[in-house]
Amino acid sequence: MGRQMRFVVPVFTVSAALLLTACGPAVQPMNTAGATGPVFVNPQKTGTLVSPAGWLTLQASAQAGAQAQYYKEQMSSTMVQGSLHSGFSLYGSLNPPDRVSLALQEGNTSTYYYQQGQVAYYEDNGRWTSTTPIANVNVFPSYEKIISQASAENIPLYQQKRTYVFDEYCNVYTSVLPAAMFTSLPAFGGAGSSRPTGQVAVTWYVGQTDHILRRVDTQSVGGVPDIGSMQVSTSTLVYDINSPIAKVSIPTALVKQLENSTK
């Protein structure tokens, strides 16, 4: 898997960062981040206990999202190891089961990914190159699986004050989940080869009008073999659900390149 494609996988697996960092200590105390980043509260000190019924609400919200024909998604991840900070972000449209258009950014490096059925390309320095398509482009079934397992294990779930997310007020829920729940997700560049331990703090946002899971924030602190302790925060936002603006179309530059290659 090339460097560019290492950043496509996380958006469909809750967060590749969870697999990278969930191999060490338990979750650290949570705090409130800036308005543009993940927001965390300590579920053990605030909120109203709503499990087990609350998990059924979250499960229904993931199931509703899985029925969407197309939507846009924005995901960001920040990794901190001592004085070193790094991150990446993804933005684009998903049309399950197999159409994707994403812009990816890592530091000052950007690339693009396009998939239609079993054909996929990534762009690097103005050149589109064929690559392996992603088998599972719908993010919601992965969330549903984690939620179902948390419900089955009767993990505490707390409801917080509602908040406005993008274009709708959302009911907010918080939980701390065993990192082992994420082992069933696809590995990120081989990082999933070690069985994760520890915990991951998760904040869930469910739309009050459409009852769809709109946003998921995560935070974990763990150890990575040969790397050391690392803190990871992620935020995944889903919006423009079933809006025509979220429909995937083939990039013009890719069309021109394919046309020129046949001449």
Image (cartoon, grey):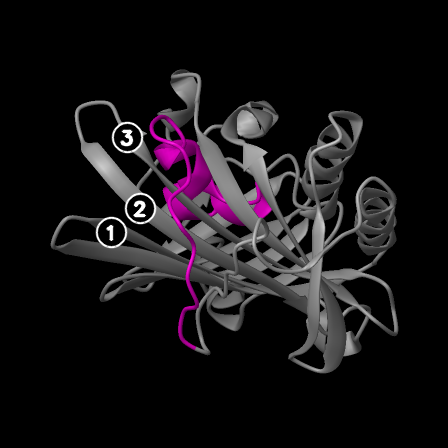
Q: Which residues are magenta?
A: 5-34
> What kind of residue is marked 2?
Gln
Which residue is the extreme one toward the left?
83
Residue 262 is labelled as none
Callout 2 crowding tier (Cα within 10 Å): few <14, some 14–19, many ≥20:
many
Q: Quadrant of residue 244?
A: bottom right
Residue that numbered label 2 is attached to: 231
Q: Quadrant of residue 196?
A: top left
Say whether residue 19 is magenta: yes
Name the residue: 86% across, 64% down. Answer: 211
Residue that numbered label 1 is attached to: 80
Q: Is residue 210 above or below residue 63?
A: below
Look at the image and tell me in which quarter the N terminus lies.
Answer: top left
What is the x, y in percent for residue 17?
41, 42
Q: Are marks 1 and 2 in contact (CB under 8 Å)?
A: yes
What is the x, y in percent for residue 39?
50, 66
Residue that numbered label 3 is attached to: 223
Q: Is residue 127 above or below residue 66?
A: below
